[in-house]
Image (spheres, rainbow, N blue to C red):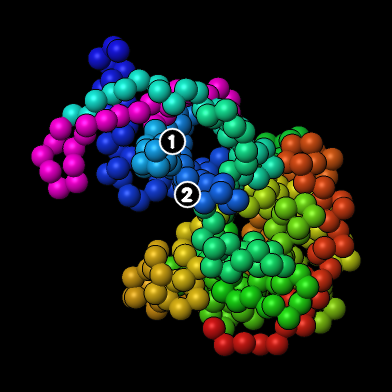
Amino acid sequence: MPKLKYLLHVALFSLAVLIAAPARAITPESGFWYNIDESGTGISIEITDNFLFLAAYGFDNAGFPTWYTSGGFMTSDRQYTGGLAAFRNGQAFGGPWIAPTYLGDTGGQVSISFDPNDETRATISWFGRTYQIRRFDIFRILYGAGNNIHQTQRMLGEWTLVFDLYNRSADYRAFPYFGDVLIFDLIDTSTNPDFYDGCRPTNSLTGFCTTAALSAHDASGYYDSVNNEQVVVVKDVPASGSSPPIYFAYFLATGLTQFDGVVSIYSPPATGSSGPFYPVRGFRSASRKYVVDGSGPNSVDPDAKSAPGGESPSLAKAIMQANGGVLPEGLTAAEVKAQFGIDVSRMAKSLKPLEQRLQNKAPRSP
């Protein structure tokens, strides 16, 4: 075997063992994958740019634990094929370093096709078999899948996002990217489907919903099992007198740590399904545990909780002010369906229960 290939396999194998903290998830998601119907075999998949590396563990015909590795460039954004390499006679845990013996691609070939509609699912073909694998979902393990509770539980936490105010026929009057932060810290299981509630926080440092945020910019969402999408409505401006509220409606394809989709900004009697729509990407910036009780990963400095806050102004009005008093053109419903596979026209009815929830929710303490 060429020395360079040997060194590459050894280096990748060493990195898989030594690096415990996963990198930020991308599409498709990095992490641990497994067949939920056949426990005992797992695959660690790490994707950086278009390079994929996997370390798979299982058992040989004699029942002894066996590891294989594979690494190389993906052939597309959703497809990988490579050889499965094996090693023997390497370093013992706690013992002196010994270069492992490379046995070649004794596992044959492995092919992975990631699901274009769900970044946490894929199809794997290896060792003469083809079956479905899933990204390890701690929420499914802890809460089960009844009534899709794991899909709702995974939304608890803080999400940081950015959307593109796409304007096709005019120069941008301001830089096209705007950001938002959403926190979900409560689940209502008395409804069907379950709702998750939270807010747009008063700033990006607190990590929790203040009384002001819950009053002026509360948010609610739920999982649409028919389309495998999360639907979220955020109150941007509360109703006042004869003035209706302003809402942000998010239609999202969500993984465990990131999502993508579109956002619509509207005020009743207009609906969030009429557009325009703007592409949005987001990632989890604080854990479920942290926003629920303040003790989980991604916690902020305690002094940040006293950072200046107060009621935040309207994001929609800031966007229009930067764009000559109107919203940018954005995408049409047909373009959203073609580009993202999201049928926002069909989703019109799904927004009404969320709007009513924001209007009728009883005040709660942060």
Residue bearing mark 2: 40
- Residue at 81% across, 64% down: 351
Q: Which residue ends up furthest to the top in the rendered image?
A: 2
Crowd around label 2: few <14 · some 14–19 · many ≥20 (10 Å): few
- Residue at 50% across, 76% down: 292
- Residue at 51% across, 57% down: 284
Query: 40 and 303: which one is in front?
Result: 40
Give the foreground label among 1 and 2: 1
- Amino acid type of disc 2? Gly
| Magenta stretch prevailing secondary structure | loop
Residue 231 lies, with reference to residue 279, above or below; the image says below
Query: 347 and 331: which one is in front?
Result: 347
- Amino acid type of disc 1? Asn
In the image, is 64 to the left or to the right of 270?
Answer: left
Q: Quadrant of residue 128?
A: top right
Magenta span has 52? no
Q: In this view of the protein, can residue 339 be seen by the observer?
A: yes
Measured as percent of width and height from the top left, residue 355 is found at 79, 71
Q: Quadrant of the C terminus?
A: bottom right
Q: Quadrant of the N terminus?
A: top left
In 3D space, how far apart are the residues under numbered discs 1 and 2 (Cα atoms)?
A: 14 Å
Magenta span has 94? yes
- Label of residue 61 in the image: 1
Q: In terms of secondary structure, where does tag 1 sit?
A: loop
Q: Quadrant of residue 126?
A: top right
Q: Which segment is the magenta one?
A: 69-98
Q: Which residue ends up furthest to the front in the rendered image?
A: 62
Residue 182 lies, with reference to residue 119, above or below; the image says below
In the image, is 66 to the left or to the right of 138?
Answer: left
